[in-house]
Image (tube, helix red, strand yellow):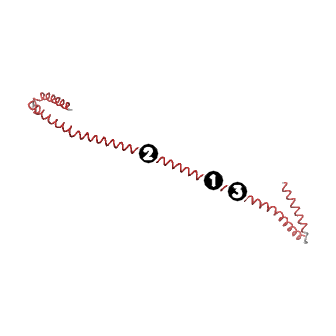
Amino acid sequence: MLKKIIILVFVTCFACFNTVFAAESGGMPQLNPEFWISQIFWLIITFGILFIVLTKVILPKISDNLETRKSQILENIETADKQKEESQKKIDEYEKIILESKIKAKNYFNDAREKILEDINKKRAALEKDLDEEISNTENELFEFKESSGDKVTKIAAETSAELIKELIGEGVNSSSIAAIVEDQAKMNKERKDVI
């Protein structure tokens, strides 16, 4: 660094000498060779003090600030990386919890659906059984009614025929003979229905 400053001073002096010879006739006191030694002396003192102040006071503070900032930035980057990893872990945990919740909900839904279908099938089977029993009972009642109604119809027909004949003729007729005729007629009608 010191070598650079010395070279800079010599280059400046060389430039001043060239300028002095060109501007000496103009009467500028800075370019008068009589004052060059004092000007060079004060130039070296001024730039020397400036160099010492810069190298010993200002530049170390700047480099310390830069190092502090660099270390702080690195710490912040490390902290950010750690927080990023932690947040990624938490996101993964949340996604896992959500996935497990979805699976549980799906399982609950499937279980509930199976139970409902099972209940429906049980109720349907019970209803079909009840309906079959009701149909069977109704068929039995109809069959019994049909069997018993034949005798009742024959009896009613015999009584009605006897009364009609009594009304037409004016005399009572043997009710057993009318009942026999009605029964024969009912048997013939029944046989015709069975043949058809």
**Image location of residue 162, percent across then percent down:** 88, 68
* Sequence order check, earlier mark of 3 and 1: 1
Secondary-structure class at tag 2: helix
Give me the C-alpha separation between circle 2 and circle 3: 59 Å
**Image location of residue 74, percent across then percent down:** 33, 41
User: Which amino acid type is shown beneath numbered disc 1?
Assistant: Glu
User: Which amino acid type is shown beneath numbered disc 2?
Assistant: Lys
State the residue position of label 3.
129
Secondary-structure class at tag 3: helix
The residue that appears at 63% across and 53% down in the rendered structure is 118
Q: Residues within 10 Å of mark 3 (few under 14, many from 20)?
A: few
Left or right relative to 2: residue 174: right
Q: Nearer the viewer, mark 2 or mark 3?
A: 2
Vertical position of residue 126 compared to residue 40: above or below: below
Question: Quick one: quadrant of the N terminus?
Answer: top left
Secondary-structure class at tag 1: helix
Q: Nearer the viewer, residue 41 or 103?
A: 103
Give me the C-alpha separation between circle 2 and circle 1: 43 Å
Q: Nearer the viewer, residue 16 or 143?
A: 143
Left or right relative to 165: residue 4: left
* Sequence order check, earlier mark of 2 and 3: 2
Mark 2–mark 1 contact, CB under 8 Å?
no
The residue that appears at 70% across and 56% down in the rendered structure is 129
Query: Looking at the rendering, which quadrant does residue 19 occupy?
Result: top left
User: Which amino acid type is shown beneath numbered disc 3?
Assistant: Lys
Q: Nearer the viewer, mark 2 or mark 1?
A: 2
Question: Quick one: quadrant of the C terminus?
Answer: bottom right
**Image location of residue 10, percent across then percent down:** 16, 29
State the residue position of label 1.
118
Left or right relative to 153: residue 20: left
State the residue position of label 2.
89
